[in-house]
Every structure is written in structure tokens, then in C-alpha cells.
Amino acid sequence: MNYAFDIPGGTLRIATEREELPLSHLLGFAARANPRRPFLFVSKVLGRHIPCRPQGMRDTYRRLSAPLLDAPGPVWVIGMAETATGLGAGVADSLARANGRTDIGYQHTTRRPLAAPPLLTFEEAHSHAPTHLLHRPLPALAHLFEGARTLVIVDDEVSTGQSVKRLAEQLGPRMPKLEQIVLASLVNWLGAAARERIARDLGGTVRTRWCSLLDGQFAFEPDAGAVTGALPADVEARQTGWVAREDLGRRGLHLPPGGARPPALAPPLEAAGRPLTIIGTGECAFAPFLAAEALELAGRDVTFQTTSRSPVLLGGAVARTAVCPDPYGEGVGYYLHNPPGAERLALALYEEARACNTPHPGLAWQCMPIPGALEAAR
């Protein structure tokens, strides 16, 4: 199928080869304040730029995990910061739930430092914040990481494949029993020749597989005389001495067969009857999603979305943007795109209590820290 979408600054032309879910169900389109890549694929199922129902997100996780049910284990899943931190965890969690496996580990890359130096770093060329860190998994998870026979790298979309390739190349020597690499995404824009080239580069005795919900290719045609938005000056974080939490995925989680349990929320919130939006913050997406999912399963009217460091221009799939406080003192911009209206109670879940004390001018949000480690991390 061929499509054309007008966004501020140009036209996106898309040709799809396979749609497990329709393009209109998966994606909207917008413009970014980023000269490296002035357009944005806006996921409708990710719960980041567009609010989503948790059960719709869970369906996406199940679909992406389905091709992995027979993957040789241990299986180590990595989500790419910041957009796919929740997506990757959801895929790993759904895989563990589907068949009662006990050999599923999860970790996400990060842009925040921990107490110890990172295991490795790599760059994502077209990102607004290109440097990724991957930290050494917790000692209790070393047997899953070092003994992994399947490595799954999850991102929301793959366009050049270079970021996931760089990560896979650096991880290969650290996983001596590795048999296959799975590159999973909601959308894959690589053609057959590009996929084969990446598989050949990863090479050796390790098999490379791809799984996605839509395959196709795209081209962006800028309008004549279009001026590309400049990146804001605050996209690169400064070092603050704040050490990030390790128990929500940066150093790994061991997913139990029944799936990770949601964090406990305060009784006054659970008793409230208003429609509710749970807001994750930056890389902290999976624990807030589990809270939203549990409330929806209990009968609440719940949507979920997450703040982002990605600057987006208004227009297309992004109608409004709320400028959010920097929760971790890094001096970078945070935004909530398409924020909830006044009819919904909004609860933002942060990694640290001190982030809740940051002023939220103009934002009628309740704020709460994630109260403890996910059970999956224990």
C-alpha cells in the first residue's frame, strides 16, 4: 500500500509491504525540532506521544513476543532508551507470561549514569540525545546475561538499523553461548537487502531474525524553502551527581512466569472515581504502565502516556505539548505531548521522591514516586 502524509515542513511518502496491524492503527506523523531528522513517526500504541489504553498496549506486547515463544533460552531482552524502555519490558514480560518461562531477563539502555561506569556506550546518530549507556547487569542476573542463547533488541522503529547493529556487535563477545539475535520493532523500514547486509555483518554462527508489526519503506520530501527547526540547547544532559535507580531495569530484571507485579499505589488514588491518566516519566515507563494496567483491569477508565525528552513541533499527530519540569536535575527539556484534559485526573509516577518536589507550573498533576523495586527485580 502507498500513502502520503503532509506534515509541517514536508511530505512523508510510505510504501508498506506487510501490515499485521494497519498503518492507521500504528502510526501518526509529526515534525521534529531536529535538523538530523525533521519528521517523526508517532506511535499510537506505545503510550508515549499519544495516550493509550493499557490493554491495547498489552496486545502490542503479546504480538511482538509471539514469534519468540520457542526462542532458545536464556533470553535476554534489551529495550532502547528512551522510547522503547517500556516496550522492551512489555515484550519480555509478555513472553514470560505466555508460557511460564523462568529464563527471561530484561534490561534497557539509558542516558543516566549509575554509581559504576557503564559496561558499554554507543551512539544513535539521528537522535536528539544520541549517547546510550548499557550497564552491567546485577550479579544475580549474570547467569541469564552471560548464558543467553537469544538476544532480543527492541525499539519502536528501525530505519537504518545501525543503532541496534552497534549494540548487537558489542554484546556478542559478552554472550559466548549466543545462538540468535532478534531485532524487534513496531515498525521496520528496512528493505530485504539492508536486512541481509546487517545479518551478514553480525555474521558468524549467530542467526539474525527480525520481527515487527509493519514492514515498509519511506521517503521524506521537504517543502521548497522549508526551514528545519533547530534542536533546543538543552538536549544534552549535564552531570549532576544524581545516581539513577538500578531496580527498575537499568541493571536488569528477571521476569517471573506470572509477569511482573505492579507497584502499589496509595488507597486515595485507587478509590477516586474520575477518569485517570497515569503518566510515566522519561525512561521510567514500565512500572507506571503496570500500575495503569492493573487499574484498568480493576474497572477504571485509564489511559497511559509518558513524558519525553524529544522536542516536537506542533502539527500533525501532536496537537498540544506541555513543557514539564526536569525531574532529575540534568538541565534537559521534558515534554508531555498530547497531554490529558481537565476531565481526567493525572498522576505522574517518578523514580525518585525528590523529583515530586520539583515545581509543576501550570500542570494539574498529582505526583508520586515509584514506591519500591518491581517484584521482578528481586
Image (spheres, rainbow, N blue to C red):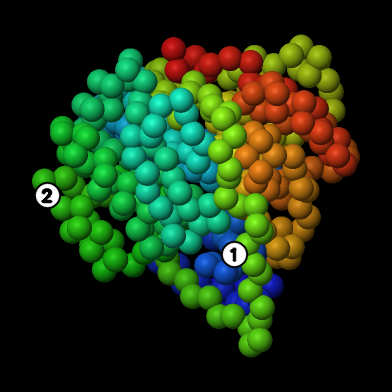
Is residue 125 at least partly visible in the picture?
Answer: yes
Is residue 302 at least partly visible in the picture?
Answer: no
Q: In which quadrant of the rendered view does residue 145 lie? A: top left
In this rendering, the answer to whether 240 lies above or below 351 is below
**Of residues 357 and 341, the one drawn nearer to the viewer in this rendering:** 357
Residue 34 bears which disc, if any?
1
- Horizontal side of 63 relative to 296 (left or right) equals left
In this rendering, the answer to whether 245 lies above or below 266 is below
Please tell me which residue is depicted at 15% across the width and 32% down the height of the picture: 177
Between disc 2 and disc 1, the foreground one is: 1
- Residue 311: where, in percent of width, then height? 66, 56
Quadrant in the picture for the C terminus: top left
According to the picture, the residue beneath numbered tag 2 turns out to be: 204
- Horizontal side of 95 relative to 146 (left or right) equals right
Q: Residues within 10 Å of mark 1 (few under 14, many from 20)?
A: many
Q: Residues within 10 Å of mark 2 (few under 14, many from 20)?
A: few
- Horizontal side of 197 relative to 160 (left or right) equals left
Please tell me which residue is depicted at 64% across the width and 67% down the height of the picture: 230
Q: Look at the numbered disc 1 and give the secondary structure of its residue.
A: loop
Under mark 2, the amino acid is Gly
Please tell me which residue is depicted at 34% across the width and 40% down the height of the picture: 120
Q: Look at the numbered disc 2 and give the secondary structure of its residue.
A: loop
**Of residues 161 and 300, the one drawn nearer to the viewer in this rendering:** 161
Residue 56 bears which disc, if any?
none
Please tell me which residue is depicted at 74% across the width and 14% down the height of the picture: 266
- Residue 116: where, in percent of width, then height? 41, 27
Mark before the other along the chain sequence, 2 or 1: 1
- Residue 93: where, in percent of width, then height? 44, 28
